[in-house]
Image (tube, grey):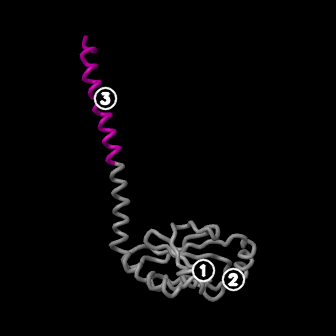
Amino acid sequence: SVQGNLMPPLRGTIQSLQRLSDIHGWVEQQIQEMRGFAEELCQVIMGSDVALSIYELHGTAAVTALTELAGLGGAFHVGVQVYWLEWSFGWCEDGSGIQAMHFGTSSLGRFRQRLPLGQTPLAPEEVLTILRDMRNSWDGQSYDLLRRNCAHFSIEFVRRLRVEEAPEWIN
């Protein structure tokens, strides 16, 4: 019969279309991976976005609400996001108080906001050179809650990254 003669070629066509669909899915996945790689490469070539990570310190929500109403800022922990990491300063017994972590993961408080400050013209190696220099002068035992804290470090680091200044309310 005519219908019986059409079935094998139709089955073959359906299988070919399924293989094409599978290939299309694989190509789409490769394109997405390449886009991610291209974005990272672009950051390395053209500079990285810089932003402040603002955390509300644990147990300070009421105090922060009152001080913000009075226009005095709040009780925050602050870090600087640049080239895939967040850098901050805190007390430690030995060595530099500068530490790195993934964006938004500080254990010192609840992540509150990301404050973009522009794009640094510096390459990753230049940023690491700045951090190496700062590690020598930001000793962990030099931390002081009011005079030398994470906000002071962030303000200085942002200035050296040559982006928009950090707002005064962070400190």
* Residue placed under numbered mark 3 in the picture: 14
Q: Is mark 2 on a helix, strand or loop?
A: loop
The answer to whether residue 161 is seen in the rendering is: no
Q: What residue type is labelled 1?
A: Glu
Q: Mark 1 or mark 2: which comes first in sequence?
A: 2
Q: Which amino acid does label 3 sit on?
A: Ile
Give residue 22's position: percent from left, percent from top: 33, 39
Cα–Cα gap, marks 1 and 3: 68 Å
Instruction: Work out whether 132 lies above or below 48.
Output: below
Cα–Cα gap, marks 1 and 2: 34 Å
Give residue 124's position: percent from left, percent from top: 38, 75
From the viewer's perspective, tell me whether residue 98 is left or right of residue 147: left
Q: Residue at x 52, y 67 (%)?
A: 103
* Residue placed under numbered mark 1 in the picture: 93
Q: Mark 1 or mark 3: which comes first in sequence?
A: 3
Q: Which residue is drawn at 34% across and 68% down?
A: 42
Residue range highlighted in magenta: 1-27
From the viewer's perspective, tell me whether residue 60 is left or right of residue 125: right
Q: Residue at x 41, y 78 (%)?
A: 128
Viewer-closest of 137 and 37: 137
Viewer-closest of 89 and 119: 89
* Residue placed under numbered mark 2 in the picture: 71
The answer to whether residue 109 is seen in the rendering is: yes
